[in-house]
Image (cartoon, rainbow, N blue to C red):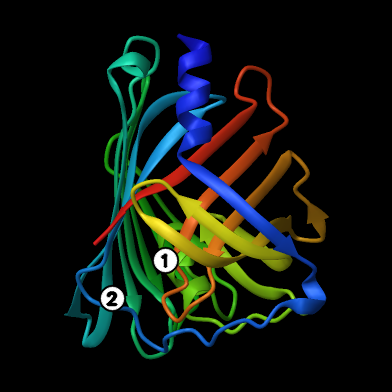
Amino acid sequence: MLIASGCGTLSRYKEIKPKRIEEIEIKKALPELRKGEKLTYEVYWKVIPVGIVTAEVKDIVEIEGKMAYHFIGTARSNKWLNIFFKVDDYVESFLDKENLLSIKHIAIRNEGRYHAHMVSEYNWQEKILRFRNLVDGTDKEFPLPSKAVDELSAFYYFRMQEITPGNPLEFVVNQAEKNWLVKIGITSFGKMNISGVGVFDSFVVEPQLYLGNKFFNKGKAFVYVSNDEKRIPLMVKIDVDIPIIGSILAILRKAE
């Protein structure tokens, strides 16, 4: 079974003739996201398929007097993983369309025995985040930096920013009381052939996380991104320095 699963994983994608960074010409990103876009990814643990992740630009709505992108993300384990560790996550984010600051983030997480229903509300005038967990009754306030986006919005924020070889993109991602500095640099360039989806000019970026001045060194992640105006993440490779978990792979299955 493991051998068959591994062969299936490898047949899903193929990297073609990567080039040196000096040869990269990055296409300009769209200044705005397209309402209705939905991306679906197959997730593998090592070589075994374990679930499906989706990311969707649901709509553009008015919230707290501001026009905002409304994002929805889901993560669900398959029947095989459910036997050992069931995952059923739902997240929602509202990102100010004008200044690209988070307005509200909702996360409903069901991961094994862990259950949480978290709501984060961003007050940028007072630079205060109100965080509530509706499961255990937690209700706290945390200071905010001058700018930040939530975890789901970060996925889309990156896609609208300009990035060039040798000049890492930097921004802050908020996670309740933690404000992570994310640095994203380009590592290579080539083509990506994803079975059933298409062949894309692409570039590879490596996100790095810092908490304060401390580098978060628990593994590495590489994101393969389409080198066009849409900047679609095609594949994510994560190698985590945590026993049992090891490597995780997410491959684009459908772009709607």
Residue drawn at (49%, 65%) of the image: 200
Residue 220 versus residue 154 in the image, above or below: above
Mark 1, residues whose alpha carbon is within 10 Å: few (<14), some, or many (≥20)? Answer: many
Label 2: which residue?
Answer: 69
Give the mark count: 2
Q: Amino acid at mark 1?
A: Ser
Residue 130 horizontal side relative to residue 88, left or right: right
The kind of secondary structure element at disc 1 is helix
For this rendering, which residue is in front, 231 or 117?
231
Question: Residue 9's x, y, as percent?
Answer: 48, 31
The answer, for residue 150, to whether it is visible in the render is no
Residue drawn at (42%, 89%) of the image: 31
Residue 76 versus residue 168 in the image, above or below: above
For this rendering, which residue is in front, 74 or 198?
198
Residue 16 horizontal side relative to residue 83, left or right: right
Question: Residue 57's x, y, as percent?
Answer: 26, 67
Label 1: which residue?
Answer: 153
Q: CA distance from mark 2 to mark 1?
A: 9 Å
For this rendering, which residue is in front, 13 or 108?
13
Residue 100 image label = none
Q: Amino acid at mark 2?
A: Tyr
Question: Residue 137's x, y, as percent?
Answer: 31, 39
Split into 4 quadrants, where in the image is the N terminus? top left
Question: Residue 54's x, y, as percent?
Answer: 31, 49
Q: Quadrant of residue 41?
A: top left
The answer, for residue 138, to whether it is visible in the render is yes
Residue 100 versus residue 94 in the image, above or below: below
Instruction: For the residues labelled 2 and 1, say whether their Cβ atoms are less than 8 Å apart.
Output: yes
Residue drawn at (53%, 33%) of the image: 10
Question: Disc 2 or 1, which lies upstream in sequence?
Answer: 2
